[in-house]
């Protein structure tokens, strides 16, 4: 008669230890692979925004889609509203998958198609903002500021070195943690809703470039010629520290 084989306590502890060691080895690799996938998706979103921006310029006399269409500052004519139809009404293109707001309960609303149906959810979920740095390195809400992406007044052909000028990038205008019912209409400072950034790297300012990737070390960017790239937060800070801010402000031909 055969007797049942039983594991000793030592053998069980040995197996558990081996499993724990393997998990400790594999878990960081899995997390790294997951973050790489999110970062890649974010870069693709930037590229798609770049394609939409180029299409907008082609259809609108070479004009770059600025934060506002003009000095009237119509809420529904901001850059997201104008690029959305050129993105196949895919509002998720404005979302950085690695950003905290990407996990908002309102993210399901981004599957809707019309601007009026998605703008509230974008106010809660978007993670890519437009470059609103003025020619002196500050945000100037004024028609006299002709060197910022605040207004749709610049032509691609008039920008010197568009391949090195940042058009948009990873950012967050505000910390909406816990605000599940947030809507643009309820914001006390609603220019944050359709995101832009000023010349800072988070956490130096809320409305700043934010390193969502590489463990808080890398930022995805879109340039004025339509191409996307990734830089380190140290590089971003160096660009901002540059007296001329060549990467952040206009140089017109």
Image: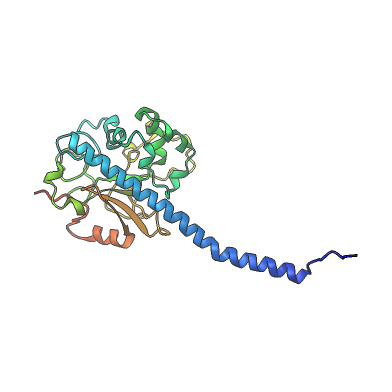
**Residue sitting farthest toward the right:** 1
Q: How is the image coloured?
A: rainbow
Left/right placement of residue 245 relative to residue 109 reads left
Task: Give the camera-side residue of 39 and 116.
Answer: 39
Q: Tell me the quarter of the image containing the N terminus.
A: bottom right
Query: Above or below — where is 130 with respect to 239?
Result: above
Tell how many labels.
0
Say whether residue 96 is visible. yes
In this rendered view, identify the residue nearer to me: 213 or 101.
Answer: 213
Q: Position of residue 71 (x, y in %)?
A: 19, 33
Q: Residue at x 43, y 59 (%)?
A: 215
Identify the residue at horizontal 31%, vertical 62% (top origin). Answer: 234
- Which residue reaches farthest left? 253
Q: Position of residue 209 (x, y in %)?
A: 32, 52
* Residue 17: x %, y % from top left: 66, 68
Q: Quadrant of the rendered structure where residue 102 is? A: top left
Asked if one can make out residue 206 in the rendered structure from this viewpoint, the answer is no
Q: Residue at x 22, y 41 (%)?
A: 54
- Residue 63 locus on image (x, y percent): 17, 38
Task: Tell me where residue 19 sits by quadrant.
Answer: bottom right
Locate residue 55: give its quadrant.
top left
Q: Is residue 8 left or right of residue 229?
A: right
Please determine whether, in this image, residue 7 is positioned above or below residue 248.
Answer: below
Tell whether 27 sits left or right of 83: right
């Amino acid at each position: 008669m055969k007797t049942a084989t039983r594991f000793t306590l030592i053998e069980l502890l040995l197996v558990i230890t081996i499993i724990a060691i393997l998990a400790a080895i594999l878990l960081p690799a899995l997390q790294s692979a997951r973050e790489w996938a999110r970062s890649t998706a974010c870069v693709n979103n930037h590229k798609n925004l770049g394609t939409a921006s180029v299409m907008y310029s082609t259809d609108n006399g070479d004009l770059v889609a600025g934060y506002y269409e003009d000095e009237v500052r119509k809420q529904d004519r901001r850059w997201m509203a104008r690029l959305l139809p050129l993105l196949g009404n895919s509002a998720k293109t404005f979302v950085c998958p690695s950003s905290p707001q990407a996990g908002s309960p309102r993210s399901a609303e981004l599957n809707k198609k019309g601007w009026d149906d998605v703008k509230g959810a974008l106010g809660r979920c978007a993670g890519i903002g437009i470059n609103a740095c003025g020619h002196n390195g500050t945000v100037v809400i004024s028609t006299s500021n002709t060197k910022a992406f605040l207004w749709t007044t610049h032509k691609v052909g008039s920008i010197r070195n568009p391949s090195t000028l940042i058009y948009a990038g990873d950012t967050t205008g505000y910390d909406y943690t816990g605000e599940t019912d947030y809507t643009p209409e309820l914001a006390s400072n609603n220019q944050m809703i359709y995101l832009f950034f000023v010349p800072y790297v988070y956490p130096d300012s809320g409305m700043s470039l934010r390193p969502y990737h590489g463990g808080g070390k890398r930022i995805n960017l879109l340039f004025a010629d339509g191409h996307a790239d990734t830089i380190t937060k140290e590089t971003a800070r160096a660009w901002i520290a540059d007296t001329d801010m060549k990467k952040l402000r206009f140089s017109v031909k």
